[in-house]
Image (cartoon, helix red, strand yellow):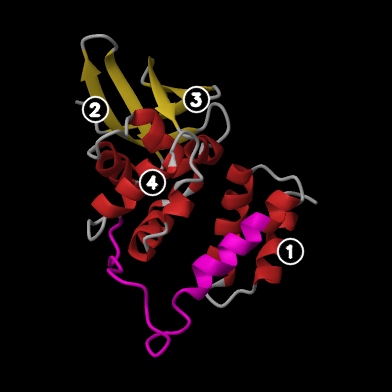
Amino acid sequence: MIGRLRGAVAEVGEEEALIDVMGVGYIVRCGQRTLQRLPALGEETLVHVESQWSENQGLRLYGFSTRDDRRAFVLLQAIQGVGPKAAMAVLDVLSPAELASAVAREDKAAVGRANGVGPKLALRIVTELKGKPITDGPVMTAAPSAASAPSAPAKPAATGDAVAALMGLGVAEVNARRVVEAAAAKLGDEASVQALIKAGLQELGR
């Protein structure tokens, strides 16, 4: 099975990309977060791939920009009722780190923002992923208390508020999350909501 592809971006569609590897074009189904991160057409990219085979559809390749995205995709599909489409939808609204945080907080509402994921399925996801290694980093098994590391939950709260504010300004959710995540990585854990919004708007050219 194919585990990753390194090649040139030949085409980008709404739900898939065509990666040219030494003259062979591989159709890779991707979520919006991954598609947004692909370089320009003709430029080289590395895509982490989850290969799946079925008698009805044959071989299908699902591509991700990071190993954590691929790992989360596999873990999500191990849950009853979560197919490739639902798993992709979850990862479009939550990065693996945000998913791990939502699971630790038992925040089914955050997971339920994914297209096609109802309250019951969202609850099943946060329940069954509890304690599982969604990312390479440490997994928080419980919400931190006020006495221990009070600043730890600040970043997810600030980024979430910043994303919501940008969406209120008419920015699509996937784009809002992309620019806010980039701003948070640049500005650090202590960045305020206002600073994240300002940096996000600058990234969007507004």
User: Marks 4 and 1: CB-CB under 8 Å?
Assistant: no
Determine the image quadrant of residue 195: bottom right
Mark whose residue sits in front, 4 or 3 = 4
Give x and y (percent) for residue 31. Answer: 46, 34
Are the two marked residues, 2 and 3, in contact with CB atoms closer than 8 angstroms?
no
By secondary structure, the bulk of the magenta-drawn segment is best described as: loop
- Mark 1 or mark 4, which is nearer the start of the sequence? 4
The residue nearer to you, when weighing 42 against 90, is: 90
Q: Which residue is mark 3?
A: 15
Q: Which residues are magenta?
A: 135-164
**Magenta span includes 126:** no
What's the distance in space between the residues labelled 2 and 3, CA to CA? 19 Å
Q: Earlier in the sequence, mark 2 or mark 3?
A: 2
What kind of residue is marked 3?
Answer: Glu
Task: Name the front one of labels 2 and 3.
Answer: 3
Q: Is residue 49 left or right of residue 116?
A: left
Residue sitting at x 23%, y 61%: 131
Image quadrant occupied by the N terminus: top left
Q: Which residue is mark 1?
A: 198
Q: Residue at x 24, y 57 (%)?
A: 133
| Residue highlighted by disc 4 | 122
Q: Residue extending furthest top?
A: 56
Badge 3 or badge 1: first in the primary sequence: 3
